[in-house]
Image: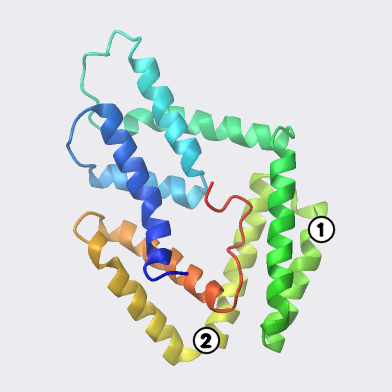
Amino acid sequence: MAQHEAVRQEASYYQAIEEFFVERRGDPLLLSNADWTLIRSWRLAGVPLRVVLRGIADAFDARAHSWARDRKVGSLRYCEGEVDQAFARWQRALAGGLEADAAGRAQARLRQALEAALPALERALQVQVGSLVAALDSESHGQGAALEAWLREQEDRLLVELQRASGAQRLQALQAEVEQDLAPYRPRLPERILSQVREESLRRRLLEEQGLPRLSLFEGA
């Protein structure tokens, strides 16, 4: 991964939402801390970027035809209900099979990426990743949001082993790289958001060093 890419991929979720909301609002005022916290809650809940943007667009499209269209929108909270509805529709589409083919292809790509990384891993990581590959074919994890939640749990467990395999010195070096790459974002993002970007960026770097992908079917969605 190119320098700064791990941080950029995480920060871009927040920035894309900020830019789209400000554009639709038609006001250059920046987001409040409460707005950033709301975006963080969507990120932690696994709401894909395109779903958030769809919800924001729906909120402003509906406002254009309402009696309140001449009033300024003061907060991203104005769009929260529409984003929640867009996320619920997306989840129902997954459960109903409307995106089953896309999810199936994503699952196959994830399995292939994990299998490709196996030969170069040390023994403990091979065992853990090998078990994960075998478990991917089980239907007991559910589909859609349920499967995504299971994958996140597996990534949390894998992260512990990745940190051990990296060693304290290398882990400290990676953390220092993340801190350096965060510098351009510090003036714009609140500390709690920076903390989330920091955590996710370190995950990406630890996985990348072992040739492993993020454990998500909807990475980049």
Q: Please tell me which residue is depicted at 41% across the width and 58% down the height of the picture.
A: 10
> Which sits in the foreground, 41 or 106?
106
**Is there any visible trace of residue 31 in the rendered image?**
yes
- Mark 2 Cα within 10 Å, few/some/many (few <14, many 20+)? some
Using the numbered discs, state the Cα–Cα distance from disc 2 to disc 1 in whole angstroms.
29 Å
Which quarter of the picture shows residue 110?
bottom right
Q: Please tell me which residue is depicted at 38% across the width and 45% down the height of the picture.
A: 39
Q: Please tell me which residue is depicted at 61% across the width and 56% down the height of the picture.
A: 216
Name the spot of residue 16 as percent of width and height, x first. 36, 44
SS class, disc 2: helix
Q: Is residue 168 above or below residue 31?
A: below
Mark 1 residue type: Asp
SS class, disc 1: loop
Q: Which residue in the structure is indicated by mark 2?
A: 166
69 to the left or right of 82 = left
- Mark 1 Cα within 10 Å, few/some/many (few <14, many 20+)? few
> Which sits in the foreground, 215 or 196?
215
Name the spot of residue 167 as percent of width and height, x first. 50, 90
Which quarter of the picture shows residue 75?
top left
Mark 2 residue type: Ser
Q: Which residue in the structure is indicated by mark 1?
A: 137
Instruction: Indicate which disc residue 70 carries.
Output: none
Q: Is residue 108 above or below residue 200?
A: above
Name the spot of residue 194 as percent of width and height, x first. 31, 61
Name the spot of residue 147 as percent of width and height, x first. 69, 51
Q: Please tell me which residue is depicted at 39% across the width and 85% down the height of the picture.
A: 172
